[in-house]
Image (tube, helix red, strand yellow):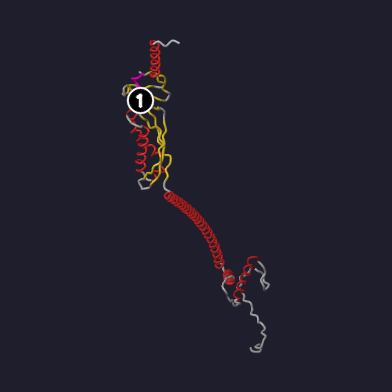
Amino acid sequence: MSPIEPFTLFVIVILVLAVALILMGVKTVPQGSEYTVERFGKYTKTLRPGLNLIVPVFDRIGAKLNMMEQVMDVPSQQVITRDNAMVTVDGVVFFQILDSVKAAYEVRQLEFAILNLVMTNVRTVMGSMDLDELLSQRDRINLQLLKVVDEATMPWGVKITRIEIKDISPPVELVDAMARQMKAEREKRALVLEAEGLRQSQILKAEGEKQSTILEAEGRREAAFRDAEAREREAEAEAKATTLVSQAIGSGNVQAINYFVAQKYVGALQAIATANNQKLVLLPLEATNVIGAIAGIAEIARDAFGGPAPDGSGGGGGRPGPQRPAPTSVPVTGPWAGNP
C-alpha cells in the first residue's frame, strides 16, 4: 500500500476545514425564536427563524431568545395592608419579548428582573389598600400592576400582557373575625328587614283601621240621618194628630181630649212596666180616670160609626160627656170585717 502523498493529504485537510467552516456558518433558527449575532463581541445582526448564514470564526451566536408569550409564577410573599393586616399573596405574570436586541443587551437575567419587579410592585400596590379592598377589588389590583410593570419593562423590549393575583390568604384569626363580622352584618340585615316588614304591616293595619273607622262613621251618619228622618215623620204625624185633636176640641168634641190623654197615659204605664230597673207599682193608679178615658174612646167610636148608646138612645145625636162608673164595693173578710 502506497503512502498518501503530501499534496493529497493537504487537499483532504483543506476539504475537511471547508466543510467544517460551512457547517459553522450555517445556522438554523426554530420558529418562535431569534438569535443575536456578535462579531468580535459586538452585536451585528439578528437571525430570524429558518436557515441563516454567518461568517465562521469571526461571528458567533450571542443570545438565543424565545419570542413567544411566556408565563412565570410569582412566588408567595407576605404583604402588610394599609390597615396593618398581614396577608400572603401569590400570582402569575404573562410576558412576551418584542425586541430581541433590547432583551439581550439592555438587561441581564431578564426573567429574574421581571420577577423581582412584579414582586416589589405587588407589595407597593396592595400595601396601599385596605383589607376589604384587597379582597373585593382584584381586577383593580391586576390593572394597576399591569400598568406599572409594563411601563418599567418597556426599555427591555418586553411586553407584559397580563398579571393575575392567584391567591390572597389572610391569617386564620383574621378569617374568623371576618366570619363573625359577616354573620353580624347578616343578622343586622335580617333585623332591618324584619323591622321593615313590621312597620309595613302596622302601616297597612292602620290604613285598614282608618278605612274601617271612615266606613263606620259613614254608617253612623247614614243611620243618624235615617233616624232623624224617622223622628221628623213621627213628629209630623204627632203634629197632625194634635191638629186633628185640636180641631175636634174646637168643634166641641170633648172626647178627643180624653182619647189623647188616655193614649199618653197608657204609653207611660207601658214605659214603666218595660223598664229594666227594679220597681214596685201600686195599682189602680187612678184607674177610674183610665176607665173614663176608655169610655171616651168608646163614645168617639160610636159617634164615628153611628152605633147605639148604652142607655138605648140612638147615636149621632148630642155629644154627652164621659160617665164615671159607679164604685163597687168589695166584700172584706178577716178579723176586721165587723168594724165599719
Q: Is residue 248 above or below residue 99?
A: below
Image quarter hosting the N terminus: top left
Report the predominant secondary structure element of the magenta stretch: loop
Q: Nearer the viewer, residue 232 or 326?
A: 232
Image quarter hosting the C terminus: bottom right
Residue 262 belongs to magenta span: no
The amino acid marked with disc number 1 is: Gly
Query: Residue 72: x percent and y percent?
Result: 41, 34
Q: Is residue 258 visible?
A: no
Q: Nearer the viewer, residue 119 or 107?
A: 107
Graded by Cα atoms within 10 Å as few (under 14), some (14 to 19) or many (20 or more), the crowding at tag 1 reads some
Q: Nearer the viewer, residue 163 or 340?
A: 163
Q: Which residue is mark 1?
A: 62
Which element is circle 1 on? Answer: strand
Q: Is residue 18 left or right of residue 327?
A: left
Point 34% across, 26% down: residue? 101
Q: Residue furthest right?
A: 312
Q: Is residue 320 above or below residue 46?
A: below
Q: Residue furthest front?
A: 1
Point 40% across, 20% down: residue? 27
Query: Residue 133: x percent and y percent?
Result: 39, 44
Residue 57 belongs to magenta span: yes
Start-end of magenta stretch: 56-60
Q: Is residue 74 above or below residue 49?
A: below
Q: Is residue 212 visible?
A: yes
Quadrant housing residue 166: top left
Query: Residue 25: x percent and y percent?
Result: 38, 18
Query: Residue 4: x percent and y percent?
Result: 41, 11
Q: Nearer the viewer, residue 103 or 297?
A: 103
Q: Is residue 137 above or below residue 70?
A: below
Quadrant housing residue 65: top left
